Amino acid sequence: MIKKYGQKIITISISALFILFFSYSASFSRTVIQLIPTLTITEEYSDNYFQTEDNKQEEYITSYGLGFSAGFLHENTKLYFGYNPEYRDYKNLDDRDGVEHYLSLDGDFNLSKYTNIITRLAYTTKDDRESGETWENTASIYGDSQITKNVNVNFLQFYSKSFDQQLRTGTYNEHKVNRTTAGIINQFGKKDRMGLDFSYDFDDYKNSDADEYTRYSPSGFITYWFAPLNGFDSNFAYENTDFDNSSNDLETYTGHIRYLRKFSKQFDGYLKYRHSYSQRESGDHHIYHPSVGFDWETSKNSRISLGIGVLFSQWDNENDDSTDPFLDMDAYKTFNFSRKGSLTITGSSGYSEAGDEAASLGYTIYYKAGCRLNYQLQKRLSSNLFASYQRDEFTEADVDRTDNRINLGGGLSWFFLKWLRFNLSYYYTDFDTDADQRGDYTENKAIFSVSFIPSQPVRLKSTPSRESLEYEIYHN
């Protein structure tokens, strides 16, 4: 007990000293260098910490975090470093009390006028392997380069080591994910382009698991406008999935062709046909998918694409053939309805013979959609509300499972002083499944924090990305 409170006093004392003596910001010509310490005290409550259907357990966690952020911004180089040691005090799970360290490093490098590289590293010393705890270490590098006037190449290397809740079973497991992609694009007209891509990825569990796989996939695409208002696009892909603990390996061929009709600069309508054919030991599977829809692209990173169609599934095994309506969706857009408020929506749908999160469950149809409302109530008081819905349908006869997940939440952020901020957040999760492998659950979670921030740290990006928004509303 004395050791526990001694650690708290040391953490708070060191934080105060750094805030008083080491807040530093300097500007040299076009270079900005900044070192900002912060102190955050957080109280977290959950009414179902282990996310179980029965035997729910409440938990209170008090955290004392000392943060340092350093930014280096130059004309061609941007670096942002963060280091956050944190002491966590559990009310009921005393054996989990301790200090954890979080580090992050982001970089954006313009090597030349035509070459750009973006890097990301996030690491934590947290290594608990117990239910209720999650952590992730990641490293990624993305690059793109214009090698000729009309040809661009790009690549991505992503690696993750994490301990989190498995979709199939609900248990917590440690696993490694690797994803490598490379592509080349040739722009042969104002709106015409074609390209080739290749991807390789795997999911490797520390303890042998049915969801382990290795996959590679070459693909190609073309978009061509044969008249100012008329065009087409097409895509073809081959995917080979090798399951480490099963002989039911998978080969999938997919392709589509779309007729495009332009109605305005940003709005296209389309007629589409997509076909998918998979081969595996347990039997072949054909999917015939006609649809009609539209694409509305308002900016490079903002679009709404919706299509209505039918999935005709034909199986060469014990699975029943089926005919199902399908909403084809890919949407991400922010609506700024006033100087104080904005609404961001996101959504996607699809189907796969072996999904990334539960590959062993086979053929999957998924839908997910969400939104986030931001509103500035007063000069120093802001608010947000969010909601999301996810649905996964595993339709093969030996699985026949449907998962539904609803996330709701909101929060308030109040800058009482320029250097003093209060945050209050609430999250609600309702998970429902008809699977025998895991149970339903609901969870209410509230978080209150006080942060001492001498000045606002520099950031690489001023606006959140689609990836960060979806992580927040789908994985609260």
Image (tube, grey):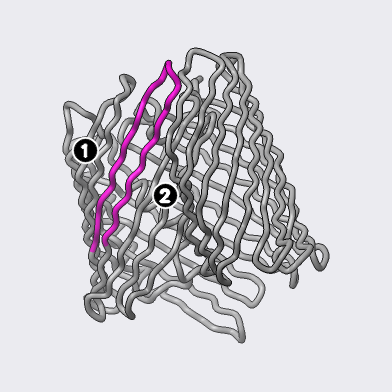
The answer to whether residue 401 is magenta is yes
| Residue lying furthest bottom | 29
- For this view, does 462 lie left or right of residue 237? left
Residue 127 visible in the displayed image: yes
Q: Quadrant of residue 192?
A: bottom right
Mark seen at residue 185: none
Q: Residue at x 46, y 47 (%)?
A: 308
Residue 92 locus on image (x, y percent): 18, 36
Residue 50 locus on image (x, y percent): 26, 33
- For this view, does 224 lie left or right of residue 263? right
| Residue lying furthest right | 148
Which amino acid type corresponds to the residue marked 1 in the rendered image?
Thr
Quick one: 327 or 423, which is closer to the camera? 327
Figure check: 443 above or below 260: above
Quick one: 378 or 448, which is closer to the camera? 378
Dominant SS of magenta comes to strand
Which amino acid type corresponds to the residue marked 2 in the rendered image?
His
Determine which residue is flagged by label 1.
442
Residue 290 locus on image (x, y percent): 55, 41
Residue range highlighted in magenta: 385-411
Determine which residue is flagged by label 2.
101
Residue 3 locus on image (x, y percent): 25, 44
Nearer to us of marks 1 and 2 is 1
Q: Residue at x 56, y 14 (%)?
A: 282
- For this view, does 200 lie left or right of residue 184? left
Mark 1 to mark 2 CA distance (whole Å): 30 Å
The answer to whether residue 146 is magenta is no
Q: Residue at x 61, y 83 (%)?
A: 30
Identify the element where label 2 is drawn: strand
